[in-house]
Image (tube, helix red, strand yellow):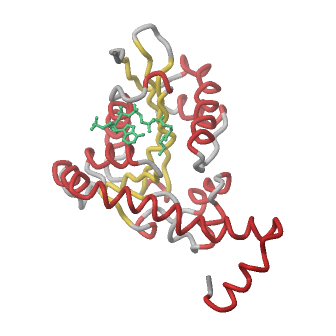
């Protein structure tokens, strides 16, 4: 039988600085386990977010760290990203990510009421959570074009794919909430529910389509080049 948890979800502060390392480690471990890319964060960066009241942290009823998410601002505050969402494996599938995202969304709206809030994700769970908050899927051109934001992707394993697509596409799906022009959460939630299988297929298609050239390159490097070059010559594959 699944264990029931209750959580305390608060805005992080100086008293939480010691949790920065465990948070960073879990972010890195989870990305590795999923085999997906991630913009790497340092404990110092996480601590800075805690000091600035730009992070949300969660604990279980026994005070064990359970989850985290933080706010980043881009394009001189025109955009806000709710990034680095992580739930400790023992506490997943209990609705915690949803509760953390809600809290960090409310904090973002309070601190930056005019800002567009966005996120990039490779996961269906996060797309679902975002949809319930009123985010809609958008193209990368609708995100912040701040160089510093995109520089954060440099530490992701998929950075080469992003650049090969001129920053117009990558493995992540972009979602945005524009306070001046947005659908109601009921509408975006309904859109997600009606299109969930299509969105799932899109994620799989991206894996296949965007990774393919890079997997081929790797294979060529391992001596499998002649056959591929032949295909490339005749069929541009
Ligand atoms: C993704 C992650 C944050 C989800 O945390 P969680 O606490 O288990 O999520 P929740 O329990 O709040 O689930 C929210 C919804 O997503 C669904 N969901 C959760 N994990 C899912 C998964 N792996 N695949 C599909 N749906 C999933 C849940 O069923 C729930 O839907 P419901 O409202 O119909 O019940 C967590 O698995 C995690 O930390 N993963 C590693 C880091 C990561 O991927 N972060 C996101 C970076 S963008």
Q: Is residue 234 depicted above or below 107 in this figure? A: below
In this view, the residue farthest toward the bottom is 234
| Residue nearest the observer in this picture, 221 or 227 | 227
Residue 155 position, x and y percent, is: 67, 52
For the point 41% across and 68% down, the residue is 139
Q: Is residue 11 left or right of residue 45?
A: left
Residue 53 location in percent, x, y?
A: 47, 31
* Quadrant hosting residue 40: top right
Q: Where ligand 1 lies, by image quadrant?
A: top left
Q: Residue at x 47, y 10 (%)?
A: 63
Apparent side of residue 121 relative to residue 27 in the rendered image (left or right):
left
Q: Is residue 46 visible?
A: yes
Quarter of the image for the C terminus: give it.
bottom right
Q: Is residue 6 visible?
A: no
Looking at the image, which is closer to me, 1 or 194?
A: 1
Give the quarter of the image for residue 191: bottom left
Q: Is residue 219 above or below residue 32?
A: below
Residue pushed farthest top? 62
Task: Residue 144: give x, y in percent of width and height.
Answer: 47, 62
Q: Residue at x 22, y 49 (%)?
A: 189
Q: Is residue 105 above or below residue 18?
A: below
| Left/right of residue 174 with respect to residue 20 in the rendered view | left
For the image shown, how many numbered marks are present on the structure? 0
Image coords of residue 146 (percent x, y) = 54, 62
- Return the residue nearer the eye: 199 or 175: 199
């Amino acid at each position: 039988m699944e264990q029931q948890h209750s959580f305390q979800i608060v805005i992080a502060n100086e008293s939480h600085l010691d949790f920065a390392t465990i948070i960073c480690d879990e972010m890195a471990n989870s990305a590795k386990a999923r085999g997906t890319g991630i913009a790497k964060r340092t404990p110092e960066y996480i601590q800075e977010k805690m000091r600035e009241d730009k992070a949300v942290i969660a604990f279980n009823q026994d005070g064990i760290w359970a989850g985290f998410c933080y706010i980043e601002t881009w394009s001189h505050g025109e955009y806000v990203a709710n990034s680095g969402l992580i739930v400790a494996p023992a506490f997943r599938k209990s609705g915690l990510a949803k509760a953390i995202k809600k809290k960090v969304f409310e904090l973002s709206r309070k601190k930056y009421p005019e800002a567009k809030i966005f996120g990039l994700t490779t996961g269906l769970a996060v797309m679902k959570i975002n949809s319930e908050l009123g985010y809609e899927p958008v193209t990368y051109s609708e995100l912040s074009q701040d160089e510093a934001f995109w520089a954060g992707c440099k530490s992701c394993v998929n950075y080469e794919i992003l650049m090969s697509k001129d920053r117009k596409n990558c493995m992540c799906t972009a979602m945005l909430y524009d306070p001046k022009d947005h659908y109601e959460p009921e509408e975006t939630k309904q859109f997600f529910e009606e299109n969930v299988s299509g969105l799932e297929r899109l994620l799989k298609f991206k894996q296949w389509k965007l990774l393919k050239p890079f997997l081929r390159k790797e294979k060529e490097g391992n001596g499998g080049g002649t056959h591929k070059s032949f295909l490339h010559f005749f069929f541009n594959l």
